[in-house]
Image: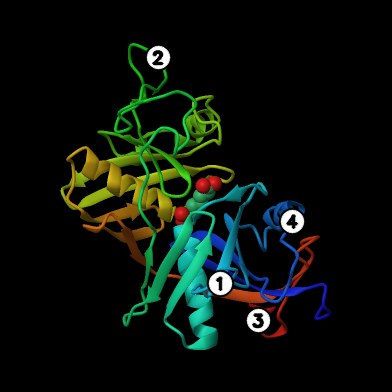
Amino acid sequence: MTDDTTVPFARMNGLGNRILVVDMRGRSEHVTSQAAISLANNPQTAFDQIMAVHDPRLNGTDQRILILNADGSEAGACGNGTRCVVSALSAETGQSRFTFETAAGILNAEETDGGQIAVDMGVPRFGWQDIPLSEPFQDTRHIELAVGPADDPIVHSPAVVSMGNPHAVFFVDNDVWSYELEKFGPLVENHPLFPERVNVSLAHVRDKQTIDLRTWERGVGLTEACGSAACAAAVSSVRRHRTVRHVTVNLPGGPLDLLWRGDDHVIMTGPAEWEWSGRVNPITGAFMRDREDASA
Ligand SMILES: N[C@H](CCC[C@H](N)C(=O)O)C(=O)O
Protein backbone atom coordinates (compact mmCIF):
# COMPACT_ATOMS: atom_id res chain seq x y z
CA MET A 1 0.00 0.00 0.00
CA THR A 2 2.64 2.55 -0.92
CA ASP A 3 0.92 3.59 -4.16
CA ASP A 4 -0.36 7.13 -4.51
CA THR A 5 -3.82 6.29 -3.21
CA THR A 6 -2.38 6.17 0.32
CA VAL A 7 -0.67 8.68 2.63
CA PRO A 8 1.40 8.23 5.78
CA PHE A 9 -0.30 8.48 9.15
CA ALA A 10 0.67 8.09 12.79
CA ARG A 11 -1.38 6.89 15.69
CA MET A 12 -0.59 9.13 18.66
CA ASN A 13 -2.23 10.32 21.84
CA GLY A 14 -2.30 13.45 23.97
CA LEU A 15 -2.94 12.34 27.57
CA GLY A 16 -4.92 9.39 26.24
CA ASN A 17 -6.95 11.50 23.77
CA ARG A 18 -6.66 9.17 20.75
CA ILE A 19 -5.35 10.99 17.69
CA LEU A 20 -4.56 9.97 14.09
CA VAL A 21 -2.18 12.45 12.41
CA VAL A 22 -2.71 12.04 8.65
CA ASP A 23 -0.12 13.54 6.29
CA MET A 24 -2.08 15.24 3.48
CA ARG A 25 0.82 17.45 2.38
CA GLY A 26 1.10 17.54 -1.41
CA ARG A 27 -2.46 16.25 -1.81
CA SER A 28 -5.49 18.18 -2.95
CA GLU A 29 -8.17 15.82 -1.64
CA HIS A 30 -9.49 15.68 1.93
CA VAL A 31 -9.91 12.87 4.43
CA THR A 32 -13.55 11.89 3.92
CA SER A 33 -16.03 11.38 6.74
CA GLN A 34 -16.51 7.87 5.36
CA ALA A 35 -12.78 7.18 5.91
CA ALA A 36 -13.02 8.68 9.41
CA ILE A 37 -15.99 6.52 10.38
CA SER A 38 -14.33 3.39 9.02
CA LEU A 39 -11.10 4.11 10.96
CA ALA A 40 -13.08 4.97 14.11
CA ASN A 41 -14.89 1.64 13.95
CA ASN A 42 -11.73 -0.43 13.66
CA PRO A 43 -10.33 -1.29 17.12
CA GLN A 44 -6.73 -0.81 15.88
CA THR A 45 -7.31 2.71 14.67
CA ALA A 46 -10.24 3.79 16.90
CA PHE A 47 -9.62 7.48 17.53
CA ASP A 48 -11.18 10.60 19.00
CA GLN A 49 -9.83 13.07 16.42
CA ILE A 50 -8.10 12.93 13.04
CA MET A 51 -5.66 15.80 12.51
CA ALA A 52 -5.23 16.10 8.72
CA VAL A 53 -2.05 18.07 8.00
CA HIS A 54 -2.31 19.95 4.67
CA ASP A 55 -0.01 22.35 2.82
CA PRO A 56 -0.30 25.95 4.06
CA ARG A 57 -2.57 28.37 2.20
CA LEU A 58 -1.63 31.53 4.06
CA ASN A 59 1.75 33.26 4.03
CA GLY A 60 3.55 32.85 7.31
CA THR A 61 1.91 29.54 8.24
CA ASP A 62 3.70 26.19 8.19
CA GLN A 63 0.70 23.92 7.74
CA ARG A 64 -3.05 23.94 7.55
CA ILE A 65 -4.83 21.53 9.88
CA LEU A 66 -8.31 20.13 9.34
CA ILE A 67 -9.88 18.21 12.21
CA LEU A 68 -12.43 15.39 12.12
CA ASN A 69 -14.27 13.80 15.05
CA ALA A 70 -14.89 10.05 15.31
CA ASP A 71 -18.42 10.48 13.89
CA GLY A 72 -16.97 12.12 10.75
CA SER A 73 -18.03 15.66 11.73
CA GLU A 74 -15.59 18.56 11.62
CA ALA A 75 -14.11 20.23 14.72
CA GLY A 76 -12.71 23.76 14.74
CA ALA A 77 -10.11 23.12 17.42
CA CYS A 78 -8.32 20.25 19.12
CA GLY A 79 -5.66 21.04 21.68
CA ASN A 80 -4.37 17.52 22.32
CA GLY A 81 -4.28 16.78 18.60
CA THR A 82 -2.36 19.98 17.92
CA ARG A 83 0.34 18.86 20.37
CA CYS A 84 0.54 15.52 18.53
CA VAL A 85 0.98 17.34 15.19
CA VAL A 86 3.82 19.43 16.66
CA SER A 87 5.51 16.32 18.04
CA ALA A 88 5.23 14.47 14.69
CA LEU A 89 6.49 17.42 12.62
CA SER A 90 9.32 18.28 14.96
CA ALA A 91 10.51 14.63 14.93
CA GLU A 92 10.55 14.84 11.13
CA THR A 93 12.09 18.29 10.61
CA GLY A 94 13.87 19.21 13.84
CA GLN A 95 11.87 22.44 13.82
CA SER A 96 10.47 23.35 17.23
CA ARG A 97 8.16 26.30 16.51
CA PHE A 98 5.14 26.11 14.23
CA THR A 99 2.35 28.34 13.00
CA PHE A 100 -0.80 26.54 11.91
CA GLU A 101 -3.87 27.64 10.01
CA THR A 102 -7.00 26.06 11.55
CA ALA A 103 -10.72 26.68 11.33
CA ALA A 104 -10.35 28.46 14.68
CA GLY A 105 -7.70 30.84 13.30
CA ILE A 106 -3.91 30.99 13.29
CA LEU A 107 -2.33 29.00 16.16
CA ASN A 108 1.29 29.10 17.29
CA ALA A 109 2.85 26.11 18.99
CA GLU A 110 6.27 25.08 20.18
CA GLU A 111 8.08 22.13 21.63
CA THR A 112 9.78 23.14 24.86
CA ASP A 113 13.17 21.91 26.06
CA GLY A 114 11.61 19.43 28.46
CA GLY A 115 9.80 17.71 25.55
CA GLN A 116 6.45 19.24 26.52
CA ILE A 117 4.45 21.06 23.85
CA ALA A 118 2.89 24.47 24.36
CA VAL A 119 0.04 25.53 22.10
CA ASP A 120 -1.35 29.03 21.93
CA MET A 121 -5.05 28.15 21.68
CA GLY A 122 -6.01 31.74 20.81
CA VAL A 123 -8.50 34.07 22.44
CA PRO A 124 -11.71 32.65 23.94
CA ARG A 125 -15.00 34.14 22.77
CA PHE A 126 -17.93 34.62 25.12
CA GLY A 127 -20.69 36.23 23.03
CA TRP A 128 -23.80 34.04 22.70
CA GLN A 129 -23.59 34.24 18.88
CA ASP A 130 -19.92 33.16 18.97
CA ILE A 131 -20.52 29.87 20.77
CA PRO A 132 -23.16 29.70 19.18
CA LEU A 133 -26.34 29.59 21.28
CA SER A 134 -29.79 29.63 19.67
CA GLU A 135 -31.09 32.28 22.11
CA PRO A 136 -29.53 35.48 23.40
CA PHE A 137 -27.82 35.29 26.79
CA GLN A 138 -26.03 38.41 27.99
CA ASP A 139 -24.06 36.71 30.75
CA THR A 140 -22.47 33.54 29.42
CA ARG A 141 -20.75 32.84 32.74
CA HIS A 142 -23.99 31.10 33.82
CA ILE A 143 -26.70 30.19 31.35
CA GLU A 144 -30.12 28.85 32.21
CA LEU A 145 -29.88 25.14 31.57
CA ALA A 146 -30.42 22.30 34.03
CA VAL A 147 -30.16 18.53 33.81
CA GLY A 148 -32.55 16.41 35.90
CA PRO A 149 -35.57 17.34 38.05
CA ALA A 150 -36.34 21.09 38.07
CA ASP A 151 -36.43 21.26 41.90
CA ASP A 152 -33.22 19.24 42.35
CA PRO A 153 -31.09 19.30 39.18
CA ILE A 154 -28.07 17.01 38.83
CA VAL A 155 -26.07 19.83 37.23
CA HIS A 156 -27.14 23.31 36.14
CA SER A 157 -26.13 26.78 34.92
CA PRO A 158 -23.06 25.96 32.81
CA ALA A 159 -20.56 28.55 31.68
CA VAL A 160 -20.31 28.60 27.88
CA VAL A 161 -17.38 29.62 25.71
CA SER A 162 -15.95 29.15 22.24
CA MET A 163 -12.32 28.04 22.00
CA GLY A 164 -12.81 27.80 18.23
CA ASN A 165 -15.26 25.03 19.15
CA PRO A 166 -18.25 25.22 21.50
CA HIS A 167 -18.01 24.29 25.18
CA ALA A 168 -20.45 24.12 28.10
CA VAL A 169 -18.77 23.73 31.50
CA PHE A 170 -20.81 22.69 34.54
CA PHE A 171 -19.05 23.54 37.81
CA VAL A 172 -19.83 20.82 40.35
CA ASP A 173 -19.33 20.53 44.11
CA ASN A 174 -18.72 16.79 44.21
CA ASP A 175 -16.07 14.56 42.67
CA VAL A 176 -16.39 14.66 38.86
CA TRP A 177 -16.48 10.84 38.83
CA SER A 178 -19.66 10.76 40.92
CA TYR A 179 -21.79 12.02 37.99
CA GLU A 180 -23.22 9.90 35.16
CA LEU A 181 -21.80 12.10 32.42
CA GLU A 182 -22.29 9.33 29.85
CA LYS A 183 -26.05 9.57 30.49
CA PHE A 184 -26.61 13.32 30.31
CA GLY A 185 -23.61 14.32 28.12
CA PRO A 186 -25.42 13.35 24.91
CA LEU A 187 -28.59 15.20 26.00
CA VAL A 188 -26.68 18.44 26.56
CA GLU A 189 -24.55 17.91 23.42
CA ASN A 190 -27.72 17.79 21.33
CA HIS A 191 -29.82 20.33 23.27
CA PRO A 192 -31.63 22.82 20.97
CA LEU A 193 -29.85 25.69 22.74
CA PHE A 194 -26.69 24.62 20.86
CA PRO A 195 -27.32 24.72 17.10
CA GLU A 196 -23.81 23.35 16.36
CA ARG A 197 -23.97 20.94 19.32
CA VAL A 198 -21.52 21.35 22.20
CA ASN A 199 -18.67 19.70 24.13
CA VAL A 200 -19.89 19.08 27.70
CA SER A 201 -17.60 19.19 30.74
CA LEU A 202 -17.83 18.74 34.50
CA ALA A 203 -15.36 20.91 36.42
CA HIS A 204 -14.57 20.61 40.10
CA VAL A 205 -12.41 23.41 41.49
CA ARG A 206 -10.05 21.89 44.06
CA ASP A 207 -8.26 25.10 44.94
CA LYS A 208 -7.28 28.42 43.35
CA GLN A 209 -4.75 26.65 41.10
CA THR A 210 -6.33 23.26 40.40
CA ILE A 211 -9.37 22.02 38.50
CA ASP A 212 -10.51 18.41 37.95
CA LEU A 213 -12.28 17.92 34.62
CA ARG A 214 -14.20 15.27 32.71
CA THR A 215 -15.54 15.83 29.21
CA TRP A 216 -18.20 14.39 26.96
CA GLU A 217 -16.93 15.43 23.53
CA ARG A 218 -19.20 16.50 20.71
CA GLY A 219 -19.10 13.90 17.93
CA VAL A 220 -17.07 11.45 20.04
CA GLY A 221 -18.32 10.74 23.60
CA LEU A 222 -16.35 10.34 26.83
CA THR A 223 -12.61 10.86 26.27
CA GLU A 224 -9.50 10.55 28.42
CA ALA A 225 -8.64 14.19 27.74
CA CYS A 226 -9.92 17.21 25.85
CA GLY A 227 -7.46 20.09 25.54
CA SER A 228 -9.90 22.72 24.33
CA ALA A 229 -12.25 21.77 27.21
CA ALA A 230 -9.35 22.28 29.63
CA CYS A 231 -8.97 25.79 28.15
CA ALA A 232 -12.73 26.36 28.42
CA ALA A 233 -12.74 25.28 32.08
CA ALA A 234 -9.71 27.41 32.95
CA VAL A 235 -11.11 30.63 31.49
CA SER A 236 -14.63 29.99 32.82
CA SER A 237 -13.35 29.48 36.32
CA VAL A 238 -11.36 32.72 36.16
CA ARG A 239 -14.53 34.49 34.95
CA ARG A 240 -16.34 33.09 38.00
CA HIS A 241 -13.49 34.22 40.30
CA ARG A 242 -12.79 30.64 41.38
CA THR A 243 -9.17 30.30 40.20
CA VAL A 244 -6.15 32.35 39.19
CA ARG A 245 -5.11 32.65 35.54
CA HIS A 246 -2.45 29.92 35.75
CA VAL A 247 -3.85 26.52 36.73
CA THR A 248 -3.36 22.77 36.47
CA VAL A 249 -6.33 21.00 34.90
CA ASN A 250 -6.47 17.30 35.84
CA LEU A 251 -8.10 15.23 33.10
CA PRO A 252 -8.73 11.47 33.34
CA GLY A 253 -5.58 10.98 31.18
CA GLY A 254 -3.39 13.32 33.24
CA PRO A 255 -2.65 16.99 33.94
CA LEU A 256 -2.40 19.95 31.56
CA ASP A 257 -0.87 23.32 32.40
CA LEU A 258 -3.14 26.23 31.43
CA LEU A 259 -2.23 29.88 31.37
CA TRP A 260 -4.73 32.60 30.40
CA ARG A 261 -2.23 35.29 29.50
CA GLY A 262 -2.71 39.02 30.02
CA ASP A 263 -3.20 39.45 26.24
CA ASP A 264 -6.17 37.04 26.50
CA HIS A 265 -4.46 34.17 24.67
CA VAL A 266 -4.79 30.75 26.33
CA ILE A 267 -1.56 28.72 26.45
CA MET A 268 -1.96 24.99 26.98
CA THR A 269 1.13 22.89 27.76
CA GLY A 270 1.33 19.10 27.93
CA PRO A 271 2.76 15.93 26.41
CA ALA A 272 2.19 14.05 23.15
CA GLU A 273 2.99 10.39 22.59
CA TRP A 274 3.75 8.50 19.37
CA GLU A 275 2.32 4.93 19.18
CA TRP A 276 2.78 3.54 15.65
CA SER A 277 2.64 4.52 11.99
CA GLY A 278 1.25 3.24 8.72
CA ARG A 279 -0.37 4.27 5.46
CA VAL A 280 -4.04 5.04 4.92
CA ASN A 281 -6.31 5.67 1.96
CA PRO A 282 -7.91 9.02 2.89
CA ILE A 283 -11.01 8.36 0.79
CA THR A 284 -11.90 4.84 1.99
CA GLY A 285 -10.07 4.55 5.32
CA ALA A 286 -8.29 1.31 4.27
CA PHE A 287 -4.99 1.23 6.15
CA MET A 288 -1.86 -0.83 6.77
CA ARG A 289 0.63 -0.59 9.63
CA ASP A 290 4.31 -0.10 8.81
CA ARG A 291 6.16 -3.39 8.85
CA GLU A 292 8.70 -2.52 11.53
CA ASP A 293 6.08 -2.11 14.20
CA ALA A 294 3.28 -4.30 12.82
CA SER A 295 4.07 -6.89 15.48
CA ALA A 296 3.99 -4.37 18.33
N1 LIG B 1 -10.11 16.50 21.90
C1 LIG B 1 -10.05 17.86 21.42
C2 LIG B 1 -11.31 18.56 21.24
C3 LIG B 1 -12.18 17.98 20.21
C4 LIG B 1 -13.41 18.77 20.10
C5 LIG B 1 -14.44 18.14 19.32
N2 LIG B 1 -15.08 17.02 19.97
C6 LIG B 1 -15.45 19.16 18.83
O1 LIG B 1 -15.40 20.35 19.17
O2 LIG B 1 -16.30 18.74 18.06
C7 LIG B 1 -9.10 18.68 22.23
O3 LIG B 1 -8.15 18.13 22.76
O4 LIG B 1 -9.24 19.90 22.27
State how far apart marks 4 and 2 are (Cα). 41 Å
Residue 222 visible in the picture:
no
The answer to whether 99 appears left or right of 34 in the picture is: left
Callout 2 touching callout 3 (CB < 8 Å): no
Q: Residue at x 24, y 59 (%)?
A: 261
Q: Nearer the viewer, mark 3 or mark 1?
A: 1
State how far apart marks 3 and 4 are (Cα). 26 Å
Amino acid type of the residue tagged 2 in the rendering: Pro
Q: Nearer the viewer, mark 2 or mark 3?
A: 2
Question: Tag 2 or tag 4, which sits nearer the N-term?
Answer: 4
Residue 173 visible in the picture:
yes
Amino acid type of the residue tagged 1 in the rendering: Gln
Q: Which residue is disc 3 drawn over?
A: 293
The location of residue 245, given as percent across then percent down, is: 20, 53
Amino acid type of the residue tagged 4 in the rendering: Thr
Q: Which residue is disc 2 drawn over?
A: 149
Callout 1 touching callout 4 (CB < 8 Å): no
Q: Which residue is disc 4 drawn over?
A: 32
Q: Nearer the viewer, mark 3 or mark 4?
A: 4
State how far apart marks 1 and 2 are (Cα). 48 Å
Secondary structure type for disc 1: strand
Question: Tag 4 or tag 1, which sits nearer the N-term?
Answer: 4
